[in-house]
Image (cartoon, coloured by chain):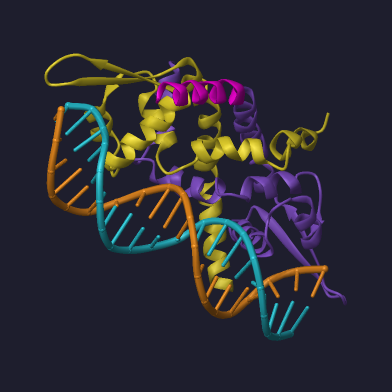
Chain colours: A purple, B yellow, C orange, D cyan
Amino acid sequence: MEQYEHTCMIRGDGGRTLRGILDRICNKWTLLVVATLDGSTLRFSDLHAQIPGISQRMLTLTLRNLERDGLVSRTVHAEVPPRVEYALTPAGSSLIPPALALASWAIEHVPHIEESRAAYEARAR
Amino acid sequence: MEQYEHTCMIRGDGGRTLRGILDRICNKWTLLVVATLDGSTLRFSDLHAQIPGISQRMLTLTLRNLERDGLVSRTVHAEVPPRVEYALTPAGSSLIPPALALASWAIEHVPHIEESRAAYEARAR
DNA sequence: CTGAATCCGCGATGATACTG
DNA sequence: CAGTATCATCGCGGATTCAG
């Protein structure tokens, strides 16, 4: 079976199903939060410290979406001061391998892509 | 070696390198265009017909970015009427497997995610 | 500490009209 | 056929402030 016969998975219903999910996954912070939670249970402040550049608002929203989608669990400990711990669910963990596949591709092709961009810019004059 | 030790690939330099690439890949149309070009050389109008919902403008911009990044080749035939053919470069083709990995994950988890969302909504009242 | 609420700018996307 | 140009929109994401 040829490779391109599989791309129906991507194109499927005009890509609507896939894109509905991709829109959740491929926003600015989701993959980074998931990767940071991989193998660890972390508090809100830990995540905020370990993900440089993320705002409180975006961290909250990203975590809410992930919780809503069942990829992250949220545990509130009845203490003072409050302690809230986040962890990946099994479904969340299962996202790691494909995310790594994409990350590997990206890292492997960054040089080629940047080279190509530079050449394109040079040609543009 | 544990799985989570690999996530440094994602987190890397704070995720900047990866996200720079992901921002190119994970927009609304790029993956769909790449998937459609997988295994075929297609004209502009073919792509426009095979990707439901995409506007001329967005197809043009998406193809330009892909060409700029060296993932798609653009061949202009000096004819009347003009004929322009697009095809994946080797680098572009290499994006298919990781894209499929993500698509497979998405499709496999759509039921679970929608279920989780429904439960979340119900709880929210 | 862990958020929620508000305001705002900008970029991505889309609709439409025009061109070589 | 294969674009380009222009205008309008809309939501993401950031900064800031307030709250339990």
Is A69 in front, or is A116?
A116
Residue at 59% of width from left, 23% of height from top? A109
Residue at 72% of width from left, 43% of height from top? B14
**Vertical arrangement, residue B32 with respect to residue A79, above or below:** above
Q: Where is residue B75 in the image (x, y as percent from the top left)?
A: 30, 16
Q: In which quarter of the image is the N terminus of chain B?
A: top right
Is A110 in front, or is A63?
A110
Q: In which quarter of the image is the C terminus of chain B?
A: bottom right
**Vertical arrangement, residue A84 with respect to residue B37, above or below:** below
Residue at 69% of width from left, 64% of height from top? A56
Is B42 in front, or is A17?
B42
In the rendered image, the residue lying farthest to the right is A80
Q: Where is residue D1 in the image (x, y as percent from the top left)?
A: 17, 26
Q: Can residue B60 be seen from the camera position used here?
A: yes
Give the left or right position of residue B63, taking residue B114 as reference.
Answer: left
Q: Position of residue B100 (x, y in %)?
A: 51, 30
The dominant secondary structure in magenta is helix
Q: Can residue A7 be seen from the camera position used here?
A: no
Give the left or right position of residue B66, taking residue A67 as reference.
Answer: left
Span highlighted in magenta in the image = A109-125
